[in-house]
Image (cartoon, rainbow, N blue to C red):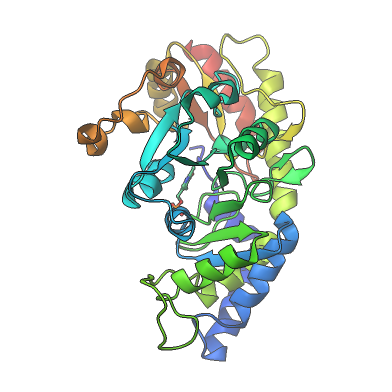
């Protein structure tokens, strides 16, 4: 049995520190918006390279609250991709705005920045690029287009903690960044969690209030907010894991290199890396014309794989009445070919050999 995300091995490696961190919170008697979240927000800001970080309940809430804070709603358009997890797009729709889909590049799986400008209208308020699988989007192009058209850039960095574009961490390049701490992410909590990052003090303050019932101070409510806070126990655990993130990301990169090397003469398409970007391989995604039979054969050999994602967002049932259908040939083609192989910092070289051999014999 080869596990997909290795969360048990991860916990084994740091269990003592985690138990100490949890115990510290339990003994403190303080569980929401205390010292742990203050420290973690500061540590995360230092790591990502922004002035502010604001902890929230999930990556989905991070995106939702960011669009709310930017007052993006009815009548507005946001440019994004259909090849992503549903939340990138849900955040737009739930705020009453319209997602405008751009196709992706077949090699990076990220937004094709050469196709953005033709979709910009008077209603366009923001571009929401997704650093999918841990692969940084070409942010130079995105920022240039945003600047020229005076629109916001909201980075969906939920799969790319620590990834760099031209030396800068993703989540620090656009106006605002959104992260998820879903357990299997590169930096994962022991439950749900998320973070917003920005250099803009007004935006930071607005998100701080939005996550806490719209309160500037207790029992004063300036606008309609929500209850979406990263709690003290999760913050304490994430502080432990943040210290290991660079090492774990390096392990992921080393594993990706091994996969690439072993797949050299096998007829599948391996992930590519952009010259100026540092991919953090949240997922290692190959392409094959025989994806479905390959996945089945691997499963018979007890190798756990997944598909991220089998149905593009614009084809989801939930959105069929919204009239969002678009011509996205690359998005629609690759979702039939992609397969995510086991990828986590504790995967062993012998496991990689087993996986590669299993694939070779299944083709
Ligand atoms: C995981 C993820 C989200 C949502 O994060 P949750 O914490 O699960 O709500 C949003 N966007 C992308 C690209 C993700 O991978």
Does residue 238 appear in the picture of this structure? no
Image height check: is 148 above or below 24?
above
Q: Looking at this view, name the residue that lies furthest to the left.
A: 321
In the picture shown, does residue 337 fall above or below 238?
above
Locate residue 7 relative to residue 197 in the image: left or right. left
Q: Residue furthest front?
A: 122
Q: Residue at x 43, y 53 (%)?
A: 60
Q: Residue 290: image x %, image y %?
A: 42, 12
Residue drawn where x is 42% and y is 15% of the image: 329
Camera-nearest residue between 163 and 242? 163
Q: Quadrant of residue 260?
A: top right
Rendered position, 359 above or below 45: above
The residue located at (66%, 65%) in the rendering is 52
Whole-percent x and y of residue 92? 39, 46
Residue 80 or residue 183, whichever sits in front: 80
54 or 271, nearer to the observer: 54
Looking at the picture, how far across and down is residue 148, in whole percent? 64, 35
* 171 vs 15: above or below: above
Residue at horizontal 47%, vertical 35%?
A: 80
Q: Position of residue 142 (x, y in %)?
A: 62, 34
Residue 233 is at least partly visible in this image: yes
Q: How many marks?
A: 0
């Amino acid at each position: 049995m080869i596990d997909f995300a290795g969360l048990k091995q991860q916990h084994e490696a740091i269990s003592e520190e985690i138990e100490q961190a949890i115990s510290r919170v339990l003994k403190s008697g303080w569980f929401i918006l205390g010292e742990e979240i203050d420290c973690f927000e500061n540590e995360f800001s230092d790591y990502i390279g922004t002035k502010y970080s604001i902890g929230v309940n999930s990556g989905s809430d991070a995106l939702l609250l960011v669009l709310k804070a930017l007052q993006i709603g009815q009548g507005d358009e946001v440019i994004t991709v259909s090849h992503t997890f549903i939340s990138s797009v849900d955040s737009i729709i739930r705020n009453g705005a319209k997602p405008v889909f751009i196709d992706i590049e077949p090699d990076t799986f990220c937004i094709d920045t050469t196709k953005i400008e033709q979709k910009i209208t008077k209603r366009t308020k923001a571009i929401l690029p997704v650093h999918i699988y841990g692969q940084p989007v070409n942010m130079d192009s995105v920022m240039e287009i945003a600047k020229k058209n005076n629109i916001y850039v909201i980075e969906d960095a939920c799969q790319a903690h620590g990834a760099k574009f031209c030396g800068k961490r993703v989540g620090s390049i656009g106006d605002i960044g959104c992260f998820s701490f879903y357990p299997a992410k590169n930096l994962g909590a022991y439950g749900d969690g998320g973070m917003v990052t920005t250099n803009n003090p007004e935006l930071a303050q607005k998100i701080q209030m939005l996550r806490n019932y719209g309160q500037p101070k207790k029992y004063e409510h300036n606008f309609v907010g929500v209850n979406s806070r990263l709690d003290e126990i999760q913050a304490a655990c994430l502080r432990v894991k943040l210290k290991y993130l660079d090492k774990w990301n390096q392990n992921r990169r080393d594993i990706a290199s091994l996969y690439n090397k072993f797949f050299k003469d096998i007829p599948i398409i391996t992930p590519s890396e952009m010259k100026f970007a540092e991919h953090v391989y949240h997922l290692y995604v190959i392409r094959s014309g025989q994806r479905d039979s390959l996945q089945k054969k691997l499963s018979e050999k007890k190798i756990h794989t997944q598909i991220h994602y089998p149905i593009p967002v614009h084809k989801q049932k939930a959105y069929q009445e919204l009239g969002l259908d678009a011509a996205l040939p690359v998005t629609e083609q690759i979702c039939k070919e992609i397969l995510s192989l086991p990828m986590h910092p504790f995967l062993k070289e012998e496991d990689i050999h087993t996986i590669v051999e299993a694939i070779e014999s299944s083709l």
